[in-house]
């Protein structure tokens, strides 16, 4: 009781405004939309001491730091970003997305976190010694904290702290060791460090957030573009016919680039690039010359809270348009293009709360791309079928698990209609939905992934004629492979322990050997990581 009274008095000392339960609930909704990906579902942060992958900068435990900060300080950090108070640019400015009242709701919710019970038995520390991973745990009577690492499939050496002694033990997905017989269970195995492989490419900035593929220099090989949200840069990587990166250069874009797409905006036959700049509330357009270079940057301003942009000919005039998800407004704005190559805002469409990732895909096979919008705040997908004149039919809402992220599309069951799979981070799984060709989807199956899954891509990895799936896991630091059976079901066959948090993942035959490879964006190593496919569903670091 005394401790609780102290916390309450401390909280009141920083704010003279009465806080209602409604304020806290509103703040929780905002937190879910804007903050949960980095700060965790309960404010635990992304402190590398509690995770298997190290982020670009430590993300603090909010339960520890919030009581020490005034409302004025928190207002400045949230509204103006980390730079306003001498912190890292990794913390973006959210004033473009949130009103002062919404920020106050968010602060109210953050202060309420201290009253919630902290989970016991958290992972305290991870050390690297050569190629051996050493993990240090707090003491637990039941040692149930080990269960959170059930996604590891490859052997790792763990070093734990027990009551009165220290010991080593082996841990993987299939087995949990009893503290009482650990001496009989020790297995020594080294996990190869793949972070310094010659095939991996460091991105020119901090916190790479997405990836797009394209042949930017017209040589027939796949190239890559990756935005770094904490550094205002877009890195373009040019590859040769063996999949090696032969050059890279960095384009300056607006503050907080979170997404990138490629398309031919000015109809010159060359791919151009578009980023969403969440911190600046804008888009940055760069026009390609077909030789791997980009110039003529143009910023489209006053795009409130852009989280994702997709390109497509939505009005069927033969010219690529843009659609932008606006997380703060829960809208999608359509920018119609003309022969000038400069899309202009035409109209907006309301979607479910907190749109985060959006796809442009022709679901009904009429030749016009439709929109699929994933909303973190409402845990839904908004399916919007294009009318053909630039507008869209009323959204069909599909309820998913908590925190839907990347999707992938394909005819999983062979009925001729596009189905979809979606990563649901809050459920540590992927959900597979059967499509009817009209924009309606019904769940087929759910499959467990690693911890905090995020990226998703599909391809025929084992060359059996069925589409497979690969999921990148941010917290457990691995890639989970699901091989398709051709009937809408998938088999979890393997997991690649990468040692890096995977935000986005893509696939293609990058080295020209006839088998599909993987490319994964890692925030912790600020790199684009490559994994060569063996044509049998397996992948090895390159």
Image: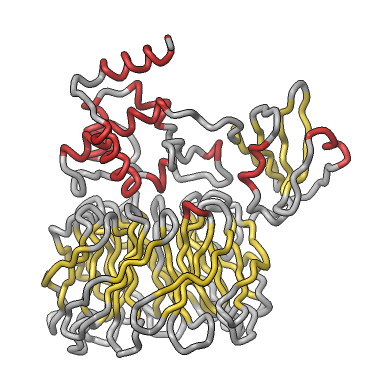
Camera-side residue of 315 and 339? 315
Q: Can residue 253 be spotted in the picture?
A: no
Q: Can residue 220 be spotted in the picture?
A: yes
**Which residue is situated farthest in the top direction here?**
2
The answer to which image quadrant residue 72 occupies is top left
The answer to which image quadrant residue 68 occupies is top left
Residue at the spot x=27%, y=78% of the render?
385
- The relative height of residue 113 versus residue 11 in the rendered view (above or below) is below
Residue at the spot x=48%, y=75% of the render?
239
**Which residue is situated farthest in the right direction here?**
184
Where's the C terminus, which quadrant? bottom right
Camera-side residue of 390 and 336? 390
Asked if residue 19 lies left or right of residue 540, the reply is left
Instruction: From the top left corner, tell me how far across and down residue 240 is, in percent.
Output: 50, 78
Instruction: From the top left corner, tell me how far across and down residue 196 is, in percent.
Output: 60, 56
- The relative height of residue 514 versus residue 30 in the rendered view (above or below) is below
The answer to which image quadrant residue 139 occupies is top right
Asked if residue 423 lies left or right of residue 96, the reply is right
- The relative height of residue 232 versus residue 80 in the rendered view (above or below) is below
Asked if residue 152 lies left or right of residue 71, the reply is right
- Give the color scheme: rainbow, by chain, secondary structure or one colour: secondary structure
Residue at the spot x=39%, y=77% of the render?
214
Where's the N terminus, which quadrant? top left
Q: How many marks?
A: 0
Camera-side residue of 268 and 116? 116
Instruction: From the top left corner, tell me how far across and down residue 326 is, in percent.
Output: 23, 59
Camera-side residue of 258 and 67? 67
Instruction: From the top left corner, tell me how far across and down residue 95 is, in percent.
Output: 19, 44
């Amino acid at each position: 009781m005394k401790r609780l009274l102290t916390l309450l008095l401390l909280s009141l000392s920083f704010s003279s405004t009465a806080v209602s339960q409604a304020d806290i609930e509103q703040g929780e909704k905002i937190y879910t939309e804007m903050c949960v990906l980095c700060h965790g579902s309960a404010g635990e942060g992304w402190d590398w001491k509690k995770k298997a992958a190290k982020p670009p900068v430590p993300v603090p435990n909010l339960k520890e730091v919030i009581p020490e900060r005034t409302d004025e300080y928190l207002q400045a950090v949230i509204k103006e970003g980390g730079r306003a108070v001498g912190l890292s640019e990794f913390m973006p400015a959210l004033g473009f997305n949130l009103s002062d009242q919404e920020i106050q709701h968010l602060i109210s919710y953050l202060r309420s976190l201290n009253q919630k019970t902290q989970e016991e038995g958290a992972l305290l520390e991870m050390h690297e010694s050569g190629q051996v991973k050493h993990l240090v745990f707090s003491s637990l009577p039941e040692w149930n904290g080990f269960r959170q690492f059930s996604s590891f499939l490859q052997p790792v050496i763990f070093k734990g702290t027990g009551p009165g002694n220290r010991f080593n033990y082996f841990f993987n997905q299939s087995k949990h060791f009893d503290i009482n017989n650990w001496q009989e269970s020790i297995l020594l195995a080294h996990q190869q460090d793949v972070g310094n492989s010659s095939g991996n490419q460091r991105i020119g900035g901090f916190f790479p957030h997405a990836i797009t593929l394209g042949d930017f220099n017209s040589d027939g090989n796949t190239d890559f573009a990756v935005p770094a949200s904490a550094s205002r840069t877009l890195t373009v990587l040019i590859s040769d016919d063996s999949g090696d990166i032969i050059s890279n250069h960095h384009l300056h874009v607006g503050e907080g680039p979170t997404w990138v797409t490629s398309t031919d905006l000015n109809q010159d036959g060359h791919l151009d690039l578009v980023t969403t700049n969440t911190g600046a509330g804008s888009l940055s357009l760069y026009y390609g010359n077909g030789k791997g270079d980009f110039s003529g940057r143009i910023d489209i301003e006053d795009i409130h809270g852009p989280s994702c942009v997709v390109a497509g000919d939505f009005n069927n005039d033969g010219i690529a348009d843009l659609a932008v998800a606006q997380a703060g407004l829960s809208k999608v704005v359509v920018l119609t293009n003309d022969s000038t190559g400069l899309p202009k805002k035409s109209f907006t469409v309301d979607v479910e709360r907190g749109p985060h990732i959006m796809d442009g895909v022709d679901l009904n096979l009429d030749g016009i791309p439709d929109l699929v919008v994933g909303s973190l705040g409402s845990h839904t997908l908004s399916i919007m079928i294009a009318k053909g004149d630039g507008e869209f039919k009323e959204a069909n809402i599909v309820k998913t698990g908590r925190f839907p992220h990347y999707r992938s599309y394909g005819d999983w069951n062979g009925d001729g209609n596009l189905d979809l799979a979606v990563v649901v981070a809050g459920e540590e799984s992927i959900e597979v939905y059967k499509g009817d060709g009209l924009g309606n989807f019904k769940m087929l199956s759910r499959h467990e992934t690693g911890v905090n899954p995020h990226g998703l891509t599909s391809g025929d990895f084992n060359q059996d004629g069925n589409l497979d799936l690969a999921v990148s896991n941010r917290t457990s630091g691995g890639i989970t492979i699901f091989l398709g059976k051709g009937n809408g079901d998938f088999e979890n066959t393997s997991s690649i322990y990468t040692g890096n948090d995977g935000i986005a993942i893509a696939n293609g035959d990058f080295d020209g050997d006839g088998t599909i490879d993987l490319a994964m964006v890692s925030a912790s190593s600020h790199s684009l990581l490559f994994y060569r496919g063996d044509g049998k569903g397996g992948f090895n670091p390159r």
